[in-house]
Structures are given as structure tokens and as C-alpha cells.
């Protein structure tokens, strides 16, 4: 049974804090194993990657077969149903159109002192994209990671994807082809992260690694951070639905279950000011579970981590939403735009009853890689800026330097950095 | 003696790779210690912070004296020379003016299918700013971290700064006052990072921690990443000067030494196509060292990590610059703008002979917190965006949902996520 909180209860604040701090992932002791794998890949390169792939994926590779060849991708594309390829292309085009608007502007301006300054954005040269194997191998995630990288102008997008016992997902390869991925390697785990970060004889290193993975992949990304850039450390997915009495309980139930079917660690929360609606949603969840192929996963997620928050006033409860900082927020109320405008911390907001999160997962256009585990308090969904970096620019004329010199040299002196001061004054004479 | 590389030498590529991979920091085994400190602060809160401050900073605190009070800041400001305060204000105003231009735009648009989407930027609610103690306690860094946070709209900027044996730097407190820092605590090390990340009875938690620190601080930031956001892990500072025969060797020497005086681990590199200039710069470095208060530090940095790269052609050598990805790049050539436009990987570019890095360190306007250790390949200097996050927005009308439904449900089916598909189709009937 999902937990129930009611903001009129005396225990509410304590229960809400427990909800905020509940850990939904097993914290495995993986860090030592991962450190050893990374050191081994740095030391032995391809040979180490091949050994770990044999051990963890039961797959025998050689330096020549690490990479997925063009003819294999051709065959995978040919094996995909045409209507699935068409749907992928619809998704790709819409994701591209949305992300093209995120391309940042360069700047260059002169101020009253005659100092010219600004900045210039440029794409990261090479980016690695981790794609999980098995059931979490999603073609839509390939698009969501690779399309913004290509929009940013990344020259080399390198995908790694484990293929346990050699089993590949043709639609994942098709998505990579569609998105313009430049290289694909059939490796995974910490060994793939290490190969991307440090390079091997067969795999040139990248400058940044993005994409979700299991605990080993997450630990490896944390370890190579600094050597390369990384995106967020992804946790289990979550949705918060805010609804009032105008909302359709069946639709809400469907959305809660769409989140819950991902993973037993996923979390679905309903916040409402209408106790009758909450009861109807609970009934609808049970009814819809009966006919759901992934009912076992969804039922366990809902029972273990599902939550229903009864609040006396939705607008007044917005600080609770900001504390939860949900990855996905759906708003199904009489005036969803108004409520949406009041939210500060959320990865993505789905406004109104006709905007189920699943539309955004696939074809809406915005990215579906979003901050989990309350990290929307300080971070954003994946976007074009994650694949670019900004170089600041400064240019002084002799007069501009003269104008700034007194303040600069005084501060240098105050900080005890006389060579800093001299590098300014030496130019004034 | 600095190392010398010549791109006409057969050993150049090997030597250049060695230069790229040289470690400039002692990798201390601090991670275990830091993990214990963080666990203790989570467990015991203020009491643990107070114990570690006694042990590491030889300073006895109580929960009441953790925070620096307004009258102490008043007294510090009164103790600063007025011309230093004026210089700080000049710097603050110029940093603010530059960063105001970085404020991002929200977006909202409708596409041909009738789908409305966009995004909204908002400030992070609370940010922690780590300011090192002792010799690396720079008022300019307080401005460079706090001003962009305030420009972004951060409500609560919380500074922590250790004060070993109770010694404070009045100009650091004055800079905090000028920049609008909201709270200051006289604590440092991993215990301060833990207090900011998890909160104590006296210190409310923040959502992101920025600012440089020693190996313990860096390890602590890496550990709390996920609980809170962090900025980059800063390494020793570095400059690359590109110069041709038109450049003034004394100015170059002054700039190389300004970098070298920071720290024995700092790195100053000259790249030139003019062997005679290189020889003159070396002579000038030795001459200027004679009269430099921090000569010992600067000489050691220059001897251990200094480098002179002779190249046959500056433009042709730009790929070497991009591989080095310097934190600071100075260009003193006949046409510095042209060269600047060709560079892809650099934290900041200082264009032309009258733009010494020191101007940018203090009063130029751009941020002086920049990516070190080749991380300009994938990251940017600190800016307003580091203190904001983006929420993506999506809104479908019934018709828009109908238009997108076929592609979304096909992809959901292909991924085996039937509840995703149902959350779309249930709304169509």
C-alpha cells in the first residue's frame, strides 16, 4: 500500500521529511571493485576491456570486434518494423526542433572604460554516451542524449552499450544511426566508462560522458569526473501528480502506473486537495494493474514507494512541491498554467490533463533526461548547453588598461600577490 | 629549469603527451578521512563541526559563535583601508555588469502540431561558498563566486571560511558584505562542506556548494555531489602565453611569474615561434625573480612545471593549444584577434599585449573561477548559469495529444512499456 500523508495531521512535517529522505536505491559496496576495473583498463587497455566483457557479459570480443560495424547497423535497421522507424524519426525531428532553440548566443561588448569583453560558446569535441543493456536499453534515450550533442556540434559522439551474450537491440542501433552517433562499441559497465575516459588502442578517449547506468556505471562516472566531464548521476525515476477535483482519476492512475512500471525503485506520488479523488485514483490503480504486462514491477513500486499527499490547499502546498523537487511534475487542475508558474523546483512540468508524461518521454520535444532524487533543486534536464562550453574573452586597449590598473594593483597588493601587480604596472611605462 | 619542447624534434609528440599527463598535485589518501568526517557531521551536527574546528583550526567555538555576526563584519570593514574598499567596489560593479549579460532567457512556443513547449530558468534557492583560509584566502574570489550567485537571484548565499586560531582576513569579510553574502560561518575543511550539504542545528543546508579548497575540501565536495550540486574540482592554476616576435619579453615574463607566484604547483607555459624571444623571456624571468617577494614559490613553480614550446607556425600549432586546454590563455601576437578566433578549448582568452591575466583576475569583469587541468575541454568558467536551473515545460491540447499519440504509443510498445502507451490512449477515447 502506498503511504498516505495529510497536511492537517500533527505528524505531517515529520512524515514529509521521511518521504524526502527515503532512499530508494540499494547502496551497493561497488566503489572498490570499480576503482580496480578503472585502474586495470588504464593499465591494459583493450585487453582489460575484453576480459571484463567476457566475465560480465559472457561475450568473447577481440580488438577488431569491439566496435559495431556499419553493416551490422544496416542489418539492425533493416530488421526494425518500418512504423517503429517512422516513430523514431518523428521523435528525433521533434527533439531536434526543441533543442535547436537552446543554442546559446556569443557576446562581445565594450564598456565605458573602453574594455572589450564577452564570451564564445563552442562544442565539446568528443562525447561518450552510455546506453544500458538488457531491459533498460531504450532507443528513446539514445535520441535524448545524442540529438542535443549533435545540435551542439559535437564532432564525435561515441556510444557504448553492453550486449550480454551478444544480444543487441536493433531499435537502439537504429536510433543511434538516426541521431548521427559516430561510433558504437558493444561494451558496458565500469570498463566501458574507463575506456571512454582514458582511451584504449581501439577507442579514442572522449572529453565528457553522459547517460544512465547501474550502480557500477554511476560509481565509475563519479571516479572519472575531472579526467572527463559527466552529466548527473541518475537515480530511479519519479513523478508527482498534482490534481484537484476536476481531474480524471483513470488518467491519473494510468500516469502513476506508467512511472511505476519502469522499476521497482520508481516513485509515483499524488498530491491532491480532494480526498474523494484520491480514493478513486487508488481504486483505478488497482483496476488497471490487472491488465498490465509489467504489473508485478508496477505493483511493487506503488506499494513500496507510492504516496498520496492530501493537502488542504494546492497553492499553499507549493513549498512542499519545491522541497520534493520532482523529476516529473504533472498538473491536472482547473488552472494548471497558474500553478505551473508558481513552481520553482521541478525537472519538467506537464501542464494540463492532456499532457501525460509519456508524451514527453518520447515525442514532445523536451529532453527526458531529467534530474532525479530531488536534484532539480540545483540542476537541469539534459540540454544543448551540456555539450558546449563557454570561453570568456577580454581585451584591453592601452587606455583601458590604464583605467583599470589602479584598482587591479591595489587588490593584488592586498592579496600579497606582487607579481600580479607588476604584470599590470610594467605595461604602463 | 623549465622544460623545453620543439615541434621540429622527433620526440615532440611524446614530450607533449608527457606535458599533458603530468600530475601537479600530490594525491593524498584523504578520502577515508573525509568520509568519516562527513558521517560524523551528519550524525552529530554542530557538535562534530565544533570538534573538528578545535582539532584542525585550533579554535574553540560554540553553536552561538559558529556564525560571524554583523558587528564583527562592521568592524572588519572599518579596519580595511578605504582605497582597498574602493578597489573592491570597482571590481564588484564590473563583475556584476559582465554577469548581468549572462542571465538566460525563458522560452515558450507552439509548433505546427499545436504542442506548446519551452522552459523556464530559476535561481537555486541556497548556495554555499567555500573560501579557503590562510594564504589562499582571496577577497577577489569571494566576489567572483558570490556576485554571479546574487545576479542569478539566489536567495541565500552562505559563506564558510576557516579562521585558524581565530585569525580573520578583514578584506574577505568586506568582500562578502559588498557582494551580498547572507550568512558567514567560521568553519572550513570537510566538516564545513558536510555542514552545508546536510545541515546542522545552526546551519541550514544549501542545494549547491561552490568555491576552491584543499584536497580535503575537494574530496568532500566529490562525496556530497548528488546530495547537493557542486562546481568543478579546482586544480592548481595555469597560464599559456602565445607570443610571436612582436611581443614584449618583459611583459611575458611578468605574466608567467604572476601565475607562478600563486603556488609551487602552478604552471606557466610560453608557446612561441621565435627562439630569440623565448631566450629573452627566460632571461627576463630570472631578472624579475630577483625583486619578487614570493620569489621562492614562483621560482620553484617555474623550475618544476614551467615550459617553453617552440613551434614552427603559431596557427598550425593551435591543435596543441586545444589539447592543452589552458585555464588562462594570453595571446600577444601581431593579430591576436585572428588567433583567438581559432581556439576551441580555453577557460579564458586575454587578447593582445595590454590584457595581462591579472586584469581579469580582479577587475576585468569576466569570472576568474575557470576550468583547470585541461577541463576546459568540457567545462566553462563560473557564471550565472551555475546558480540557476532550467525546468522544461510541455502542454498539449486534446488535438495536439491526438497528433502525437501514434508515434508515442509505438515507441512505448517497442520499449515494452505498456503503461506508458496506455497513459496516452486512455485520453483519446
Image (cartoon, coloured by chain):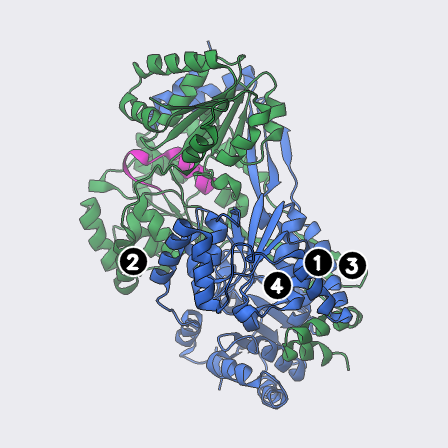
Chain colours: A blue, B green
Q: Which residue is mark 1?
A: A178
The outermost residue toward the top is A429
What's the distance in space between the residues labelled 2 and 1, CA to CA?
Answer: 44 Å
Q: Which residue is at 35% across, 57% downward?
A: A36
Image coords of residue B245 (percent x, y): 53, 12
Question: Residues at marks 2 and 1, common chain?
Answer: no
Q: Callout 2 environment at 10 Å: few (<14), some (14 to 19), or many (20+)?
A: some
Q: Callout 4 environment at 10 Å: few (<14), some (14 to 19), or many (20+)?
A: many
Q: Callout 1 environment at 10 Å: few (<14), some (14 to 19), or many (20+)?
A: some
In the displayed structure image, the side of residue B138 where residue A406 appears, left or right = right
* Above/below status of B187 relative to B345: below
Label placed on residue B35: 2
What's the distance in space between the residues labelled 3 and 1, CA to CA?
Answer: 22 Å
The local secondary structure at tag 3 comes to loop
* Above/below status of A314 relative to A110: below
Q: Are marks 2 and 1 in contact (CB under 8 Å)?
A: no
Amino acid at each position: 500500500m502506498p503511504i498516505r500523508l495529510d497536511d492537517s495531521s500533527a505528524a505531517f512535517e515529520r512524515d514529509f521529511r521521511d518521504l524526502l529522505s527515503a532512499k530508494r536505491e540499494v547502496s551497493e559496496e561497488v566503489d572498490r571493485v570499480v576503482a580496480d576495473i578503472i585502474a586495470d583498463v588504464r593499465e591494459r587497455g583493450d585487453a582489460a576491456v575484453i576480459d571484463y566483457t567476457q566475465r560480465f557479459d559472457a561475450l568473447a570480443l577481440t580488438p577488431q570486434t569491439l566496435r559495431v560495424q556499419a553493416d551490422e547497423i544496416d542489418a539492425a535497421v533493416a530488421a526494425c518494423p518500418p512504423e517503429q522507424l517512422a516513430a523514431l524519426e518523428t521523435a528525433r525531428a521533434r527533439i531536434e526542433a526543441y533543442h535547436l532553440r537552446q543554442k546559446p548566443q556569443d557576446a562581445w561588448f565594450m564598456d565605458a572604460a573602453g574594455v572589450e569583453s564577452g564570451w564564445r560558446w563552442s562544442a565539446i569535441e568528443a562525447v561518450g554516451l552510455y546506453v544500458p543493456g538488457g531491459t533498460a536499453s531504450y532507443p528513446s534515450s539514445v535520441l535524448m542524449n545524442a540529438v542535443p550533442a549533435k545540435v551542439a556540434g559535437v564532432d564525435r559522439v561515441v556510444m557504448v552499450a553492453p550486449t550480454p551474450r551478444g544480444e543487441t537491440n536493433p531499435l537502439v542501433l537504429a536510433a543511434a544511426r538516426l541521431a548521427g552517433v559516430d561510433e558504437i562499441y558493444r561494451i558496458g559497465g565500469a570498463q566501458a566508462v574507463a575506456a571512454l575516459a582514458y582511451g584504449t588502442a581501439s577507442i579514442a578517449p572522449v572529453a565528457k560522458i553522459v547517460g544512465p547506468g547501474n550502480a557500477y556505471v554511476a560509481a565509475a562516472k563519479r571516479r572519472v569526473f575531472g579526467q572527463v566531464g559527466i552529466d548527473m548521476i541518475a537515480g530511479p525515476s519519479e513523478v508527482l501528480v498534482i490534481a484537484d477535483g476536476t481531474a480524471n482519476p483513470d488518467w491519473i492512475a494510468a500516469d502513476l502506473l506508467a512511472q511505476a512500471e519502469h522499476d521497482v525503485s520508481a516513485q509515483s506520488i499524488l498530491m491532491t486537495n480532494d480526498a474523494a479523488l484520491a480514493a478513486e485514483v487508488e481504486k483505478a490503480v488497482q483496476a488497471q494493474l490487472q491488465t498490465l504486462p509489467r504489473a508485478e514491477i508496477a505493483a511493487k513500486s506503488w506499494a513500496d514507494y507510492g504516496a498520496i499527499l492530501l493537502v488542504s490547499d494546492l497553492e499553499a502546498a507549493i513549498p512542499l512541491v519545491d522541497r520534493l523537487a520532482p523529476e516529473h511534475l504533472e498538473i491536472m487542475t482547473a488552472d494548471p498554467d497558474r500553478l505551473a508558474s508558481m513552481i520553482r523546483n521541478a525537472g519538467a512540468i506537464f501542464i494540463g490533463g492532456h499532457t501525460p508524461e509519456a508524451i514527453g518521454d518520447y515525442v514532445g520535444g523536451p529532453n527526458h533526461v531529467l534530474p532525479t532524487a530531488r536534484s532539480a533543486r540545483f540542476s537541469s534536464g539534459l540540454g544543448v548547453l551540456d555539450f558546449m562550453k563557454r570561453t570568456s574573452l577580454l581585451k584591453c586597449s592601452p587606455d583601458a588598461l590604464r583605467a583599470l590598473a589602479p584598482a587591479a594593483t591595489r587588490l593584488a597588493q592586498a592579496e600579497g600577490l606582487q607579481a600580479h601587480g607588476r604584470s599590470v604596472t610594467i605595461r604602463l611605462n
